[in-house]
Image (spheres, rainbow, N blue to C red):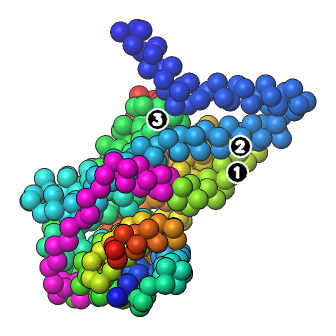
Amino acid sequence: MESLRTIWFFFQDQILGMKWLNALIGRGLEALGLDPDGLWGGILQFFLYDTIKIFVLLSLLIFGISYIQSYFPPERTRKILGRFRGLGANTLAALLGTVTPFCSCSSIPLFMGFTSAGLPVGVTFSFLISSPMVDLGSLVLLMSVFGGRVAVVYVVLGLVIAVVGGTLLDRLGMERYVEDFIRNAPRIETESAALTRHDRVLYARDQLLATIRKVAPYIFLGVGVGAVIHNVIPQTWVETVLGDGNPLAVVLATLVGIPMYADIFGTIPVAESLLFKGAGLGTILSFMMAVTTLSLPSMIMLRKAVKPKLLGAFIAVCTVGIILVGYFFNFFQQFLL
Amino acid sequence: MEILVVGAGCASCDKVYVDTREAVKELGLAAEVRKVEDLVEMVRMGIMSVPALVLDGRTISAGRTISKNQIKALLEQETK
């Protein structure tokens, strides 16, 4: 048992967390005459270590995940979901949301495709909530930064928000607030093309390159902000605003995060350094969820497909869910880290 | 022959449109390339992931930002 634990921690810290890289960079900086414990040495070390770590993990992840995703094009997901009813359908939608390839500019065509095929609006929303919030990539990155327990609980709670949120929107009778042109659209069954293994590898490679190109600016920005927080902002500030001292920290972090648009990979370095400075675990996870799930651009897009009431209900359900998750994590922080 | 490039509101959709036009020109195909940005039309066509390429009513690529060379290869294969 003890040896299993050792192996797991080695995997978590050295393979996923690449702690050896941090030590190596620290020594390299010292050799160049920079003190890793000083201001600039510290900023540089954090920046180099985090950027390299995230890009390496990201590349491996996106490739592997895209390969899996090539088995679940939206057409297939829709077909699978059509066979289920009730809570089962919502749960499956949330799970498939984690593996269906999805970019924000596809959210509207996808929403329309699901709805016009007769899927209940709640099932579609379960999918739309889980898709940006929880993906396989975030699971591995969270493991690398916060450890396995936090990562698993984050994913599980993310799925719970998606299932409960979707079900709730259904129960509230939100079906009628979908724009009429979608409800009246004819039902079309489309088949997705059959892929060979070579096609899947090509697809995974294309996804990898496209994703890196798309998220690179967010990662540099995120790591940059993270490095500054990590080394410049006084601990007492962070503790006062985002730590135990402020009972409204979770609400604050969520509301600040909602209009922002960033990839989960860009938010992790910010979260990492805030945690280091004494912010509550739940507070920063709420911030991450809010940034990835709700953003101004995605709301403007969604507004084209749904009426204001449904959009409002969607935002409200997500916000409340994210805030509850934040308090949950803050309450159980000592058992999870 | 009619080629539709489906997708609105993102940079990759615009890029695929420009690349498709060039690919058609370079291959010397007698094809009309049109951009579909209307949501209602998208639903009617059953497109769920963008950018998508539709050749004479048949979806030949969806949800992938394919390069000009890939578009050329696809068109050559499909028009053989």
Residue at 38 percent across and 84 percent down: it is B3
Residue nearest the viewer, comparing A60 with A4: A60
SS under mark 1: helix
- Residue A224's disc is 1
Residue with the mark numbered 3: A143
Q: Amino acid at mark 1?
A: Gly
Image marks 2 and 1: residues in contact by CB distance under 8 Å: yes
Which residue in the protein does label 2 denote? A47
The quarter holding residue A289 reads bottom left
Q: CA distance from mark 3 to mark 1?
A: 21 Å
x and y percentages locating residue A297 in the rendered image: 48, 74
Q: Which quadrant would residue A50 be assigned to in this image?
A: top right
User: Mark 3 — on which chain does it sit?
Assistant: A
Rendered position, A110 above or below B14: above
* Residue A288, image x, y percentages: 49, 52
- What residue type is disc 2 on? Phe
Asked if marks 3 and 2 touch (Cβ < 8 Å), the reply is no
Which residue shows up at 68% across the image and 30% down it?
A22
Chain letter behind tag 2: A
Residue A72 in the image, given as x and y percentages of width and height: 27, 55
Give whichever of A160, A104 is nearer the camera: A104
Q: Amino acid at mark 3?
A: Met
Mark 1 or mark 3, which is nearer the start of the sequence? 3
